[in-house]
Image: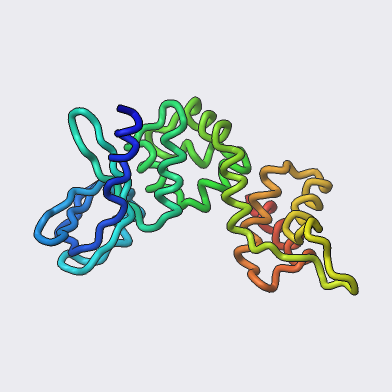
Amino acid sequence: MARDGGRQRRMIAQLRGRLEATDGDSAVIDVGGVGYLVFCSARTLRGLPRAGEAAALQIETHVREDHIHLYGFADEAERAWFRLLLTVQGVGARMALAVLSILSPDEISAAIAAQDKAALRQVSGVGPKVAGRIVSELKDKAQASALASVTPLRPAARDAAPEDDAPTASTEAVSALVNLGYGRGEAFAAVATAARELGAAGDLPALIRQGLKELSAT
């Protein structure tokens, strides 16, 4: 039954149609004359067009004995974090949507990487125990997600071509901040934010400066 449920859970992966209406925690998408009720985060609902206009959502389908629920997301990153949050003990679909209503995927990743329980506790229904489980159980996955969002910048060009396993500017910036006394989690989150802000201009000195600026602002 579990394997069948897993297949059913992904039967509907996306909906494209016309937005009929939105409510406090859901939207109705008309697809070919059929109205699908989709539960969404407040962030996703705010990004939807006006009623009557075309809309598209990434979908996670949950099949239970007494119901079939559709959960909608603005993009794949939000859906991926919804799935990750559901792996944490004590976090159900409604709580996962509540987290995604307050924090963006990048903010969740940074909060977990920095072990920032306070950021998660601002979500209604997330108490200290659940916040602790989220940052503990998802720490490795959050760091991997944040690393993937950081442009893999090399240090300044050298005469010889760098080895394949040479450290990137981002990893060297994290090491520099750790050597200055910052925790690896908070240094990692600061450099990830700095790399997104600086883009191609983010060489090692710039990443360290911007990383320090991010840390001093917290």
Q: Is residue 199 left or right of residue 57?
A: right
Q: Is residue 193 left or right of residue 27?
A: right
Report the coloring of the rendering. Answer: rainbow
Q: Is residue 179 above or below residue 158?
A: above
Quadrant in the picture for residue 172? bottom right
Q: Is residue 57 above or below residue 144?
A: below
- Residue at figure coordinates x 76%, y 65% from the top left: 154
Image position, residue 175 (x, y; %): 79, 50
Q: Is residue 84 left or right of residue 113?
A: left
How many numbered marks appear? Answer: 0
Q: Is residue 60 left or right of residue 143?
A: left
- Residue at figure coordinates x 45%, y 26% from the top left: 89
Image position, residue 28 (x, y; %): 17, 54
Quadrant in the picture for residue 62? top left
- Residue at figure coordinates x 73%, y 41% from the top left: 183
Q: Residue furthest right?
A: 159
Image position, residue 8 (x, y; %): 28, 40
- Residue at figure coordinates x 55%, y 47% from the top left: 109
Q: Is residue 197 above or below residue 2?
A: below
Quadrant in the picture for residue 68? top left
Nearer to me, 43 or 2: 2
Image position, residue 7 (x, y; %): 32, 40
In the rendered image, the quadrant that contains the N terminus is: top left
